[in-house]
Image: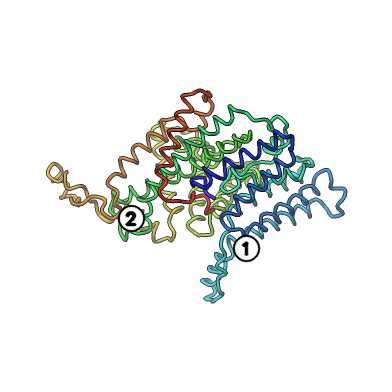
């Protein structure tokens, strides 16, 4: 079920909200939590109920293993390290089978000239997210950083619908106490008002902004055979902003929906296009994934404790794996490689004590991120090369006919005049890009607005207008981009 659907906004969310608090008002705490788990599983299975047993078995398996690794370990007669290894391998095997089996078979066929038939498996929704979430739980249980939790609370930790499908990748220590707290079982009207406010902002980002940029990005990446300079830049920047508003919109809606139930999700998105270097970018973009990669891959590899050469290797390994996590494809792996290399360059630059003006630092960071997104978006290498060739002008430059008279001298330098942006039908795209740049770089984000939120009539009117306007423009359903990861 999509956050940006009529079923979710007008049926699922209101019914879940009112039934949950009705049960709590009758002091049926276990029943209320059980209903929330049931509602979350219904939300998950709306897409395809065939994968419901998958998440249920994964949840039960990890709960048993996690409890066997903490204070209840004395009940188990095998070593903790062996048990952890079995648990992690089981989770990664499940993820690997569904997400990477065809990728592996395809590459094996290419190397060996084989003809092994592909499995053509559909990727179960949210498998990357709930797998990483539970691996972190197992590792922390092994470290003695968890204690025994009620299974119902654990089930909520895994399945809670606002964060189930596309994150954030929540940590047990920031969620379990909230589900166990009796203070969160009382209706909080400030949280409800704030949740509606944040949800309305996220919905607007997705439906009005991200879905418009998607039209131009799709036309350039998937439909156009060639792209001249302005078309290529419009294509790449449209995807750069589509992904920003799509993912930040989802994060806002997740935070808003969770607040209705008195649950505070961790910040997962903090204006990453304001970053002045690539390290700062990863402190702002998909924050909980970055935290997972740091705590469970980079630091266990040795982090920066084993000398510069090993540090650079650890960075590269971490981000190549981060790229692979996003998708089973060489373009994703190369995207991760680019970011690993950029972080290495940044670290070396800082070690020399160099600095640069903030405007230049921002310009370089933003454009690197924009170019790297080309590989992230491209379905094939050829699509990425097509866009990049256009961005450097190898397919020519075409400007609007209305500038032909004043800029006629540019014809001597290879510039043509005619119908502008014809291959992507994006005459308004650069206006939208300029507005998006102002919003992402100079304006407060939703989490900053949340900190200054006041439950008054003006915020209510603003939220209602925003929701009504956005709902009236929901002409078609479109999945969130991170649903694919």
Element at badge 1? helix
Q: Work out how far the residue at label 1 is from the one at label 2, CA to CA, in angstroms.
A: 36 Å
| Residue 145 pos. (x, y %) | 75, 40
Relative height, residue 333 to residue 147 (above, below): below
Element at badge 2? helix
| Residue 50 pos. (x, y %) | 62, 61
| Residue 372 pos. (x, y %) | 44, 49
| Residue 83 pos. (x, y %) | 78, 54
Colour mode?
rainbow
Instruction: Identify the mark at residue 485; answer none if there is no mark.
Output: none
- For label 1, the crowd category at 10 Å Cα-Cα, with few meaning under 14, some 14 to 19 and many 20 or more, is some
- For label 2, the crowd category at 10 Å Cα-Cα, with few meaning under 14, some 14 to 19 and many 20 or more, is some
Name the residue located 51 percent from the left edge and 29 percent from the top edge: 448
* In the foreground, 189 or 419: 189
**147 sits left or right of 405 in the view:** right
**Number of marks:** 2
Q: Which residue is mark 1?
A: 97
**145 sits left or right of 334 in the view:** right
Relative height, residue 461 to residue 31 (above, below): above
Name the residue located 45 percent from the left edge and 34 percent from the top edge: 274
Q: Which residue is mark 2?
A: 389
* In the foreground, 12 or 145: 12
Q: Nearer the viewer, mark 1 or mark 2?
A: 1
Name the residue located 77 percent from the left edge and 42 percent from the top edge: 150
Which residue ends up furthest to the left in the rendered image?
A: 405
Relative height, residue 114 to residue 1 (above, below): below
Name the residue located 23 percent from the left edge and 50 percent from the top edge: 420
Marks 1,2: beta carbons within 8 A: no
* In the foreground, 460 or 337: 460
Precedes in sequence: disc 1 or disc 2: 1
């Amino acid at each position: 079920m999509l956050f940006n659907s009529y079923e979710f906004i007008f049926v699922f969310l209101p019914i879940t909200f009112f039934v949950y608090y009705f049960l709590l008002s009758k002091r049926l705490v276990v029943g209320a939590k059980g209903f929330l788990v049931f509602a979350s599983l219904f939300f998950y299975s709306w897409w395809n109920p065939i994968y419901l047993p998958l998440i249920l078995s994964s949840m039960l398996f990890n709960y048993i293993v996690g409890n066997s690794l903490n204070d209840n370990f004395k009940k188990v007669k095998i070593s903790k390290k062996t048990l952890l290894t079995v648990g992690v391998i089981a989770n990664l095997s499940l993820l690997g089978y569904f997400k990477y089996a065809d990728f592996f078979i395809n590459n094996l066929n290419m190397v060996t000239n084989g003809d092994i038939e592909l499995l053509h498996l559909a990727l179960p929704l949210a498998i990357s997210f709930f797998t990483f979430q539970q691996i972190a739980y197992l590792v922390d249980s092994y470290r003695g950083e968890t204690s025994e939790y009620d299974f119902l609370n654990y089930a909520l930790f895994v399945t809670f619908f606002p964060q189930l499908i596309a994150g954030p990748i929540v940590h047990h220590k920031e969620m379990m106490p909230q589900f166990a707290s009796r203070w969160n079982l009382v209706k909080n009207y400030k949280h409800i008002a704030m949740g509606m406010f944040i949800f309305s902002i996220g919905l607007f980002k997705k439906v009005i902004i991200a879905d418009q940029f998607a039209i131009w990005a799709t036309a350039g990446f998937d439909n156009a055979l060639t792209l001249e300079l302005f078309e290529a830049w419009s294509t790449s920047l449209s995807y750069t902003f589509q992904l920003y508003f799509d993912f930040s919109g989802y994060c806002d809606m997740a935070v808003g929906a969770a607040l209705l139930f008195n649950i505070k999700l961790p910040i997962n998105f903090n204006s990453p296009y304001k970053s002045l270097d690539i390290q700062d970018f990863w402190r702002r973009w998909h924050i909980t994934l970055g935290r997972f990669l740091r705590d469970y891959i980079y630091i266990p590899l040795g982090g920066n404790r084993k000398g510069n050469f090993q540090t650079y290797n650890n960075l590269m390994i971490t981000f190549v794996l981060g790229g692979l996590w996003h998708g089973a494809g060489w373009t994703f792996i190369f995207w991760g490689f680019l970011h690993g290399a950029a972080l290495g360059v940044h670290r070396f630059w800082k070690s020399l004590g160099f600095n640069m003006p903030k405007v230049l630092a921002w310009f370089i960071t933003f454009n690197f991120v924009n170019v790297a997104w080309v590989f992230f978006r491209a379905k094939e290498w050829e699509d990425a090369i097509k866009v990049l060739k256009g961005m450097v002008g190898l397919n020519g430059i075409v400007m609007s006919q209305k500038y032909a008279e004043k800029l006629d001298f540019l014809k001597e330098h290879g510039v043509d005049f005619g119908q502008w942006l014809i291959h992507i039908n994006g005459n308004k795209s650069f206006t939208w890009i300029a507005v998006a740049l102002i919003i992402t770089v100079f304006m407060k984000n939703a989490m900053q607005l949340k900190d200054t939120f006041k439950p008054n009539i003006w915020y209510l009117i603003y939220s209602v207008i925003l929701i009504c306007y956005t709902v009236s423009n929901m002409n078609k359903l479109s999945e969130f981009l991170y649903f694919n990861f």
